[in-house]
Image (cartoon, helix red, strand yellow):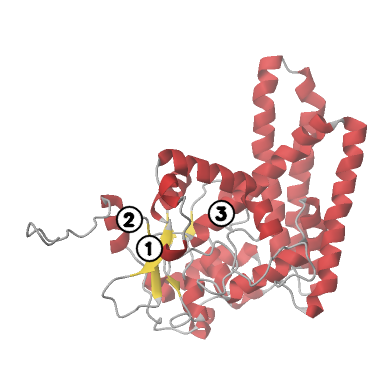
Amino acid sequence: MGGGGRSSAPKQRNSGEDVLLKKRVPHTKPPFSLSKVKKAIPPHCFERSVVRSFSYVFYDLAIASCLLYVALNYFSTLPYNLSLLAWPLYWILQGSVLTGVWVIAHECGHHAFSDYQCLDDTVGLLLHSFLLVPYFSWKYSHRRHHSNTGSLERDEVFVPKKKSSIGWYSKYLNNPVGRVLTLTVTLTLGWPLYLAFNVSGRSYERFACHYDPYGPIYSDRERLQIYLSDAGVLAVCYGLYKLVLAKGFLWVVCVYGVPLMVVNALLVLITFLQHTHPAVPHYDSSEWDWLRGALATVDRDYGILNKVLHNITDTHVAHHLFSTMPHYHAMEATNAIKPILGDYYHFDATPIYKAMWREARECMYVESDEKSKDSGVYWYNNILD
């Protein structure tokens, strides 16, 4: 400032962010090609087995059926206090298992379930519809996410805002209470809001909705399948309506509704943490390319849930590089490509609850570094004027 001879002190980041900045992943063009990375992976990792893929479907559905059987036949015999514990346990376990089912349907959308596209789409449509997901609608937007990962202009999910674009209310949410509110809304309503209103998605010139066959997300050749997706979701909704009439609203909420909310929360949390990290860059059109974008993802450790969720959590980098690879080969492929990727491979072992809070705190918007020649490379920040 002028009058007192005091110079403006630079804004300081907190110590935790200083540590994270030192661990930034490289953002320059990597010294390896995609073909070189692929050659490091054993060829059998790209082989898809119908029998093996279906075994995971049957395994997950068998566990879900057993959990449902126990809840319906034994919870009513428990003392009241124990039943208050049993139902939340059921919701968490059933929601986790059904998230595994969601992941298999996701694999169908990538044509990683089998060598037969029609079979993949049939299985994916059935599984995703059961979880109220419009299969083809999501498949096409998710494909564009994979084609444009890390692009500030064209990515489809958890696209960060630049500082100039964040809302006026952001400064009121930049505190512990605001972060709790933001995370609560994100985990409970984030998924349906994304499907219905494209919240956190790419900006389009007009209203975008995953249920609208004529929305800007889809091309003319895709519109018929969007109708099919809507029909699948409506059919399950009708089935749920009939169940409400037969069993009651509370029965449907306890047996199906709350586990579905757990699925939605896990899905949003997993996606958020895969693509949001202070050490991971985003790019504008002047810098973005597909390989660097695909590498701008994070593998995380969810403990026992890694297996329940078919390793979508800790093999996500490999998945973005080779999305048609079945999940049961992804861990072997990840171990094979780590020496090639070197510092371009990013794994964060921070406990998930800590990582969720840290990312909510540190990752409010993106901006390019001052005085950096790489003006098209953007990093997360949380300093508000």
| Residues packed near mark 1 inside 10 Å, few (<14), some (14 to 19) or many (20 plus) | many
Residue highlighted by disc 2? 385
- Residue type for callout 1: Ala
Q: CA distance from mark 1 to mark 2?
A: 22 Å
Quarter of the figure with residue 385:
bottom left
Instruction: Judge by depth and name the residue closer to the eye, 220 or 143.
Output: 220
| Residues packed near mark 2 inside 10 Å, few (<14), some (14 to 19) or many (20 plus) | few
Residue under the image location 62 percent in, 52 percent down = 267
In terms of sequence position, does the residue under pointer 3 or pointer 2 come before the other?
3
Lateral position of residue 4 relative to residue 178, left or right: left
Please, is residue 131 above or below residue 158 in the view? Answer: above
In terms of sequence position, does the residue under pointer 1 or pointer 2 come before the other?
1
Instruction: Judge by depth and name the residue closer to the eye, 194 or 203.
Output: 203
Q: CA distance from mark 3 to mark 2?
A: 30 Å
Please, is residue 119 above or below residue 127 in the view? Answer: below
Q: Position of residue 364 (x, y in %)?
A: 43, 56
| Residue with the most extreme front position | 3
* Residue 283 seen in render: yes
Q: Position of residue 330 (x, y in %)?
A: 58, 65
CB contact under 8 Å: marks 1 and 3: no
Label 3's element?
A: helix
- Residue type for callout 2: Asp
Residue under the image location 40 percent in, 81 percent down = 30
Name the mark on residue 279. Answer: 1
Instruction: Judge by depth and name the residue closer to the eye, 372 or 85.
Output: 372
Q: Position of residue 67 (x, y in %)?
A: 75, 36
